[in-house]
Image (tube, rainbow, N blue to C red):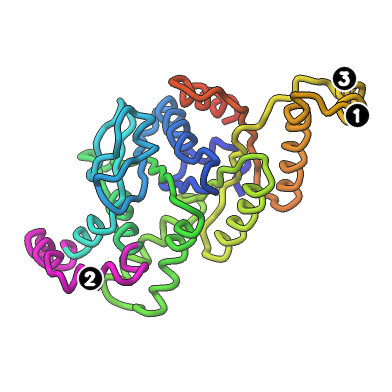
Amino acid sequence: MASSLQELFTRRVVLITGKGGVGRSSMTAALATVAQRKGVRVTICDIGDDPADYSPLARHFGRDRLPSTPEELVPGIKGVVLLARSGQELFLKSVLRSGTLARAALSSDALRRLLSAGPSFKEMGVFFQLLTLLRAKRPDGGDEHQLVLIDMPATGHTLSLTGLPELLLKLVPRGPIAAALKEGQSYLNDPKLGAAWVVAIPETLPVSECLELLAGLQKTGMPAGGVLMNRVPLDPFSAAERAALQPSIERLNPLGAEGFRRPVLAQREIHRLRAGTKLPIFELPELTPGATLISSLADAIGKIS
């Protein structure tokens, strides 16, 4: 179990996951900024179906989408979209020892339909492209991508990816696919190399889904580093002030009563989450959206890491 947020920046691959709408993309961009400030070479990824798809993560770096091959977005931060077809081509190239033959194979309508028919084939492509990033070396022998941060899609996709090696190894226990799966497992399932961090906000449904996701990650053997509790509202009142105001708020229910109750309800959900997991939970403040959001969120993360 991670004892501090600093450990996130020492891993090779970190999955940033959680319910939709909790700020996964913003958190990924902010974590990349913190890693960059620490001198870590970081590569951010999202998972797409088409290289032309819009990317919320890319927008934080002034682009509509991430490139299909790793490219520097700002000094110290590279970006790439993980695509099933790209990974499938890389896998076939490694087996056939020829990029030309791999592209020719994928130009077959029958093979493309086969690869698109089963979800595991798609995730295998993403998995192998990720493995290719983790294998990449610099001329001096160091890792090209010291830290790979992946802005994961919805919860189900995360568990499909983390559960892929065990599922497919039962079906294909030997051969090049099995070898790639086992190599990928050596990164994802080693708590010193890989981790999943769940982003949540202090509301009922996101906290419930967070707890379910943590249980699912454990079943697939994916180490969970902790929870990044995003958008925690500041309570402007002391305990004494809140106690004095509470009777009037309940009696009159004035405009703004919901805002008065919100910090208390948020802390109630955070307490529920703490009761449901032994993993560390790091609270990050609610910040104003806009051009400075990522920098401000990175500053907040830096203070606790």
Amino acid type of the residue tagged 2 in the rendering? Arg
Give the CA distance from mark 3 to mark 1.
16 Å
Q: Nearer the viewer, mark 3 or mark 1?
A: 1
* Residue 124 sits above or below residue 46 on the image: below
Disc sitting over residue 113 in the figure: 2
Q: Amino acid at mark 3?
A: Glu
Question: Badges 1 and 2: C-beta atoms under 8 Å apart?
Answer: no
First in sequence: mark 1 vs mark 2: 2
Label 1 residue SS: helix
- Residue at (75% x, 31% y) in the render: 258
Residue at 45% in and 50% down:
193
Quarter of the rendering occupied by the C terminus: top right
Where's residue 284, x and y in %?
61, 31
Q: Which residue is mark 1?
A: 251
Q: Position of residue 291 (x, y in %)?
A: 43, 20
Secondary element under disc 2, as helix, strand or loop, is: helix
For residue 35, above or below residue 188 = above
Q: What amino acid type should be assigned to the residue bearing mark 1?
A: Arg
Residue 241 shows which numbered tag?
Answer: 3
Q: CA distance from mark 2 to mark 3?
A: 65 Å
Q: Could you say which is closer to the camera, residue 103 or residue 221?
A: 103
